[in-house]
Amino acid sequence: GPAFYLNWDADEPALREAFRDLRVRQALSYGMNREEINEILYQGKLVPAGYTIGPQSPYYSEAAAKKYATFDLNRARALLDEAGYVDHNGDGWREFKDGSPFAFTIDVVAPGMWADICQLVTEQWMTLGLKAVVNGAMRDLIWPRRDNGSFDVHFWLMEGAADPLDTLHDWAITGPSKPFWHRRAFENPPDWLREATEAFIAVRTTRDTALVRSYMERARDLHTENVPVIVSGFVYHVW
């Protein structure tokens, strides 16, 4: 399903600080109207959910999928206020700690449905007082920005939902510049991402199925609780 990958190492220090604040990420998740996305763009075939292992996996948890996935503008605004991102000058836009507008760009391959999703979510986040702008371009332009970390938010379909081990470089610290949304994690990772990485790696060297499940569930819950990526949900395949 649709996923908005926040750049934890964004070039702009104020934006980098904001995206690393759990309250901001929770607010972005609460501020996303997944049911509106579902009805307008997926004809009711999108199962609203947050960032977690998907329903195709034996490690799927419905409780985890629902965490931070409800649409709650009041909760989102309260979290942003609590984090210190408020509208000081009364122009309708929240400001960073340095006084500049809380603004960011969403990179998306366009034209097409992906750009439509981003435009809809941009309008939803703007109701929170966040100045989001869609940067739609050909894949040949968008992908290099993802690879070199020069994006603010990168839109893509969620990778590894059915099996994170298949695209572990998006879920764990597998080397320098990995995962792409936190390229500096290899040098100084947040505690939760370090623990999730250790759990994923332990799965690869464990034959005890009970231990495998405990490691996978721990990694799943760490990702779900910390909301590093803002996900709209999982696509229901009619066929």
Image (cartoon, rainbow, N blue to C red):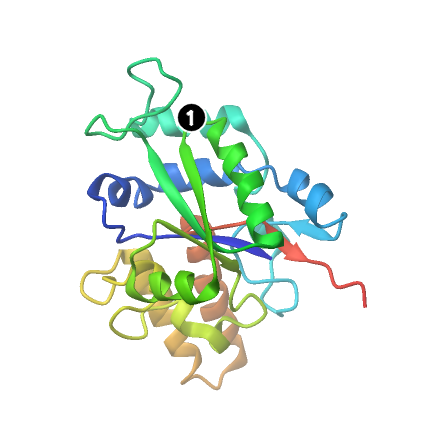
Position in image of residue 12 (x %, y %) = 23, 44
Q: Which quarter of the figure is the N terminus placed in?
A: bottom right
To which quarter of the image does residue 87 belong?
Answer: top left
Q: Nearer the viewer, residue 24 or 90?
A: 90
Residue position for label 1: 129
Q: What residue sits 50% from the left and 64% below the top? A: 217
Looking at the image, residue 81 lies above or below residue 146: above
Position in image of residue 79 (x %, y %) = 40, 29
Q: What residue sits 53% from the left and 57% below the top? A: 52
Horizontally, residue 211 falls left or right of residue 239, namely left
Looking at the image, residue 181 lies above or below residue 37: below
Q: Nearer the viewer, residue 26 or 191?
A: 26
How crowded is the residue under tag 1: few (<14 C-alpha within 10 Å), some, or many (20+)?
A: many
To which quarter of the image does residue 189 belong?
Answer: bottom left
Position in image of residue 109 (x %, y %) = 50, 58
Position in image of residue 20 (x %, y %) = 30, 46
Horizontally, residue 107 falls left or right of residue 64, namely left
- Residue type indicated by callout 1: Gly
Q: Which quarter of the figure is the C terminus placed in?
A: bottom right
Disc 1 element: loop
Q: What residue sits 39% from the left and 72% below the top? A: 169
- Tag count in the figure? 1
